Image (tube, grey):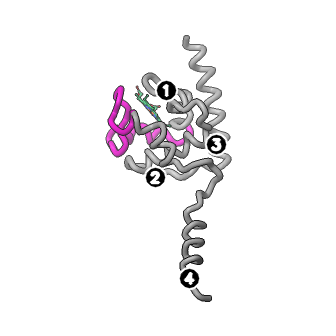
C-alpha cells in the first residue's frame, strides 16, 4: 500500500475522532464554559492544574463529583453555566479538568452515565429537602 498525504490525513482524522458520541470535546466545552471561573479561580473555584485543590474532589469519584457539579454547589452554577449542556458534555469537560489537575479519568461509559444521572436525581431531592 502506498502512503500519500490523503491517506495520512484520513488516518489522522479517524484517530482524532472521540470514542463516545458527543457534540464536542471536553477541552472545547471547558474553554466555552468552565475556563471563565476555573482558569483563574473566580469565587474560589478550584483552578485547572491546582492538584492540591483537586485531589480531595477527585477522591470523591467520577459519579459523585460529576453529579454534584452538574446540579451546582455554592458558587458553582448548575451545568457549569451552560443551560444546554448535557450530562455527557459536562462530564467530558470535567474529565478534561481532572486529567489536567493530577487525576486520570476516562470518558464515562453508559453505565457510569446512568449512575451519574441517578446521583443527580438523588442530589436534587436532597437539596430540596434541606431547604
Ligand atoms: C461562574 C463560575 C463557574 C463556572 C462557569 C464553572 N464553575 Fe465549577 N465551580 C465554581 C466554583 C466557585 C466552585 C467551588 C464551589 C465551592 O466549593 O464553593 C466550583 C466547583 C466545581 C466542582 C467541584 C464541585 C464539588 O462537589 O465541590 C466541579 C466538579 C466543577 N466546578 C466543575 C465545573 C465544570 C465541569 C464547569 C464547566 C462545564 C464549571 N465547573 C464551570 C465556579 C464555576
User: Which residue: 54% across, 37% down?
Assistant: 66
Q: Residues within 10 Å of mark 2 (few under 14, many from 20)?
A: few
Mark 1 near mark 2, Cβ–Cβ under 8 Å?
A: no
**Does the magenta portion include 121?**
no
**To which residue does mark 1 refer?**
77
Q: Earlier in the sequence, mark 1 or mark 2?
A: 1
In the image, residue 74 above or below residue 58: above
Mark 3 near mark 1, Cβ–Cβ under 8 Å?
A: no
Question: Of discs 4 and 3, which sits in the foreground?
Answer: 4
User: Which residue: 49% across, 26% down?
Assistant: 77
User: Where in the figure is residue 64, as x and y percent of width and height?
Assistant: 54, 36
Callout 3: SS: helix
For ligand 1, give the image quadrant: top left
Q: Which residues are magenta?
A: 37-63
Q: Quadrant of residue 45?
A: top left
Give the CA separation, mark 4 to mark 1.
49 Å
Give the CA separation, mark 4 to mark 3.
40 Å
Q: Earlier in the sequence, mark 3 or mark 1?
A: 1
**Horizontal side, residue 37 vs residue 127: left or right:** left
Give the CA separation, mark 2 to mark 3.
17 Å
User: Which residue: 56% across, 34% down?
Assistant: 67
Q: Earlier in the sequence, mark 4 or mark 3?
A: 4
Give the CA separation, mark 3 to mark 1.
20 Å
Picture quarter with the N terminus: bottom right
**To which residue does mark 3 refer?**
113
In the image, residue 10 above or below residue 89: below
Q: Quadrant of residue 123?
A: top right
**To which residue does mark 2 refer?**
104
**To which residue does mark 4 refer?**
4
Q: Residues within 10 Å of mark 1 (few under 14, many from 20)?
A: some
**Mark 3 Cβ and ligand 1 under 8 Å apart:** no
Picture quarter with the C terminus: top right
Amino acid at each position: 500500500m502506498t502512503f500519500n498525504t490523503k491517506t495520512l490525513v484520513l488516518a489522522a482524522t479517524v484517530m482524532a475522532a472521540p470514542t463516545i458520541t458527543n457534540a464536542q470535546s471536553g477541552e472545547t466545552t471547558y474553554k466555552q464554559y468552565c475556563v471563565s471561573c476555573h482558569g483563574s479561580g473566580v469565587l474560589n473555584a478550584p483552578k485547572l492544574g491546582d492538584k492540591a485543590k483537586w485531589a480531595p474532589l477527585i477522591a470523591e469519584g467520577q459519579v459523585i463529583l460529576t453529579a454534584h457539579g452538574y446540579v451546582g454547589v455554592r458558587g458553582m452554577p448548575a451545568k457549569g453555566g451552560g443551560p444546554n449542556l448535557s450530562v455527557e458534555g459536562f462530564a467530558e469537560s470535567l474529565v478534561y479538568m481532572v486529567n489536567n489537575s493530577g487525576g486520570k479519568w476516562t470518558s464515562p461509559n453508559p453505565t457510569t452515565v446512568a449512575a451519574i444521572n441517578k446521583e443527580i436525581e438523588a442530589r436534587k431531592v436532597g437539596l430540596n429537602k434541606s431547604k
